[in-house]
Each structure stands twice: as structure tokens, then as C-alpha cells.
Image (cartoon, helix red, strand yellow):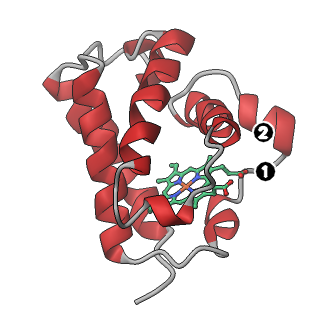
Amino acid sequence: MNPNLSIYDNLGGAEGVRSLVEAFYPRVQQNELLSPLFPEDIMPVMDKQYMFLSQFFGGPALFSEAFGHPMMRARHMKFPITDRHAEEWLGCMAGALIEIGVEDDLRDFVLQRLSGPAHHFVNTP
Ligand code: HEM
């Protein structure tokens, strides 16, 4: 991990973020707790997540340019999200980071950055 670069650049830019998202959603779809929340056609979700994570990781603001202010917590309110959902979501992300070959220090840093938002989206006890 190069601490002078953004997460986006550390992951290898657009291609890296795309690979991450493509490794992540099959895990979500195979997860018993998470899969019922997601539509069968995962492509649109994958595209939006690619756009969001690009900007969240310090790359181009693709999501905001297309959809305006992210308001991510609000966008998740219609789904009942518990602490366990947050942990499973982060678990899928950890698996995806390993699958695409991200080294340990970068992986830990990325998971740490995502852990805040994941727990912030919890809206159900
Ligand atoms: C805490 C556990 C989480 C759960 C259970 C969850 C679940 C979901 C679900 C069900 C959708 C909607 C899929 C659809 O279009 O029908 C969604 C959309 C999305 N999620 Fe999550 N999510 C979680 C955490 C996160 C985190 C941590 C991020 C990013 C930091 C994130 C980013 C997004 C984005 C960008 C979308 C698309 C938003 C849109 O439709 O405009 N999610 N999520």
C-alpha cells in the first residue's frame, strides 16, 4: 500500500474497483442473510456500487454526477439492516478483497474505512 495514494489508486483505479465489485456481489448473493434484500438482477446494483465506491475511495465522483448527493443512510432505510447484516456485508467485502489479491495492509485499511458506514446504516435492532 502506498500511503501517498488514494485507496482508489492503490486498488488500481477503475479496473481495480470494478474487479472488487464483481467479486463482492456473488458473495452477497450466496449469503443467506443478505441475499433476500437484493434484487435478482444484480447488474444495476453493481453499477451503482462501482460508481459510489470509486468516489468513496478518492476516485472520480461518478455516483454524485449521475444521482446527486449520495445520502447513503437514507437510501438504505427501506431495508431492515441489523448489526449482523453490517458484519456479513463487511465479511463479503473482506472475501472479495482477498479474492482479487489485495495485500493485507490495504485490505485492513479498506475494511476499516467501510466499517463506519456499514454500522451507520444499521436501522433495526
Ligand atoms: C450494512 C449492510 C448493508 C446492507 C444490508 C446493504 C443493502 C443494500 C441494498 C438491499 C441495496 C438496494 C439494492 C436495490 O437496488 O434493490 C443497497 C444499495 C446500495 N448500497 Fe448497500 N448495504 C449495506 C451497506 C452498504 C455500504 C457500507 C455501502 C457503501 C459504503 C453501500 C452502498 C450501496 C450503494 C452505493 C447502493 C446503491 C444505492 C442506490 O440505489 O442508489 N451499502 N444496499
Where residue 97 appears, as percent x and y from the top left, is 29, 29
Quarter containing the C terminus: bottom left
Where residue 34 appears, as percent x and y from the top left, is 42, 62
Residue marked by disc 1: 69
Q: CB atoms at circles 1 and 2 under 8 Å apart?
A: yes
On screen, residue 24 versus residue 62, left or right, reads left
Of the residues shown, which amino acid type is indicated by label 2? Ser
Of the residues shown, which amino acid type is indicated by label 1? His
Task: Kindly indicate the quadrant of the structure image that contains residue 26.
Answer: top left
The Cα–Cα distance between marks 1 and 2, rounded to whole angstroms, is 5 Å
Where residue 102 appears, as percent x and y from the top left, is 25, 20
Residue marked by disc 2: 64
Q: Nearer the viewer, residue 82 or 111?
A: 82
- Label 2 packing within 10 angstroms: few (<14), some (14-19), many (20+): some
Where residue 10 appears, as percent x and y from the top left, is 38, 15
On screen, residue 52 versus residue 58, left or right, reads right
Q: Residue at x 51, y 10 (%)?
A: 15
